[in-house]
Amino acid sequence: MKIAQRVSYKRASPPLDIGLRVKEIKAEGGFVIDFGVGEPDFETPDDIKEAGIEAIKGGFTRYPPTAGFSDLRLAICRKLKEENGLDYVPEQVVVTCGAKHALYNIFQVLCEPGDEVIIPSPYWMSYPHMVRFAGATPVIIHTTVRSGFKLTARQFEEAITSKTRAVIINSPSNPTGAVYSRDELMRIAEIAVSRQIYIVSDEIYEKLVYDGLNYCSVAALGEEAYDFTITVNGFSKSHAMTGWRIGYLAAPREIAQAVTFLQGNSTSGACSISQKAAIAALKTDKKELKYMVNEFSRRRDYMVAELNKMEKISWLKPSGAFYVFCDISRSGLGSVDFSRQLFEQYRVAVFPGVVFGWDSHIRISFANSMDNIREGLSYIRNFLQGL
């Protein structure tokens, strides 16, 4: 059977199938510790669940508007103003089936064949695919440990060509947990504006920052930065709503209109029930979010302290998200072999860094119970000692 070239793929290697094996083992009641997980291990808050239940009971089950219900878009505008210092009107906001959907739509409306999109590496694994699906070329820029896994202004400027259409900034980052400072973002924004390059700002982890850091949205850096930034966010990480599939983008009006047209001829509007739940999420008491952030911070501190006792592994302490990106190059194994052998020997699942563009690293998630973190890290220590 012939498959269209734009979605041609190679079958995932065994460690990339670990996620499926983890689910199978759990379903069978077997033992596994999942450090590959990319979602909070907390429940969606009860008041958000109740809003969804009431929407169902109230028959709120018809087709939704393509760009989202007006009350949700207005609530998102209010959130962006109060929490991020951003002035948007509902016509600039599009509600999507998760933040991933927003990103996919953006590249579809921004890019033509021959265009280039700059992607700092390590990167979230879907970015290059999304760019290719739009017919454009991903330009991967390898960041450094010295820069904290962040794209520098110099690297950005040197990567720009006449074909550059956009740059992706993911802060806090998946997989590194890196958080860009206001000054770092300002230098990148100044270059982007001067060269008329769009900044696609993936802010899905914005609430998960630690050590008293002040989060900064790129579009809040000034009027010109605002005009060249597309802000992407959602409810998956901040409100433990991964399965609800609800996200959004805020953009210049023309881009929002183009995304709405595209979405109207692809998925149509996001789930009506999830939209009602999202409105409740924007009104919910922040104490549950604060508890989740404090718990993630506690787990992070424990994890890095234990990793610091191990040989053949090193890391940078993440400032956000819920991952530690670990250098395993001294183990003598690439990330695929490391992940596979660790899983086969100890039933501990980690993500091989090769899918993020760094084969010398693995990603370990601390979106897990402290008991699992303690036990899983002890198995990693035993595994490293046995190499």
Image (cartoon, rainbow, N blue to C red):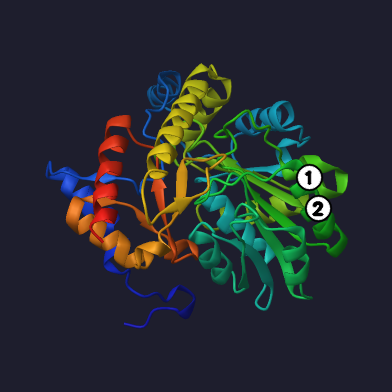
Mark 2: secondary structure: helix
Residue at 13 percent of width and 44 percent of height: 30
Please state which amino acid type lies under the numbered disc 2.
Answer: Arg
Q: Residue furthest bottom?
A: 2
Q: CA distance from mark 2 to mark 1?
A: 6 Å
Residue at 23 percent of width and 55 percent of height: 343
**Image coordinates for residue 69, horizontal then vertical, percent:** 59, 34
> Can I make out residue 240 in this image?
no
The residue that mark 1 highlights is: 183
The residue that mark 2 highlights is: 187
Left or right side of 330 for 131: right
375 over 3 or under it: above or below: above
Residue at 77 percent of width and 55 percent of height: 188
> Can I make out residue 261 in this image?
yes
**Image coordinates for residue 226, horizontal then vertical, percent:** 80, 46
> Is there CB contact under 8 Å for labels 2 and 1?
yes
Mark 1: secondary structure: helix
> Residue 372 shows which numbered tag?
none
212 over 4 or under it: above or below: above
Q: Residues within 10 Å of mark 2 (few under 14, many from 20)?
A: some
Q: Quadrant of residue 373?
A: top left
Left or right side of 165 for 289: left
Nearest to the observer: residue 186 or residue 316: 316
Nearest to the observer: residue 258 or residue 174: 174
**Image coordinates for residue 137, horizontal then vertical, percent:** 62, 74
Q: Quadrant of residue 283?
A: top right
Please state which amino acid type lies under the numbered disc 1.
Answer: Asp
Residue at 84 percent of width and 64 percent of height: 195
Nearest to the observer: residue 302 or residue 65: 302
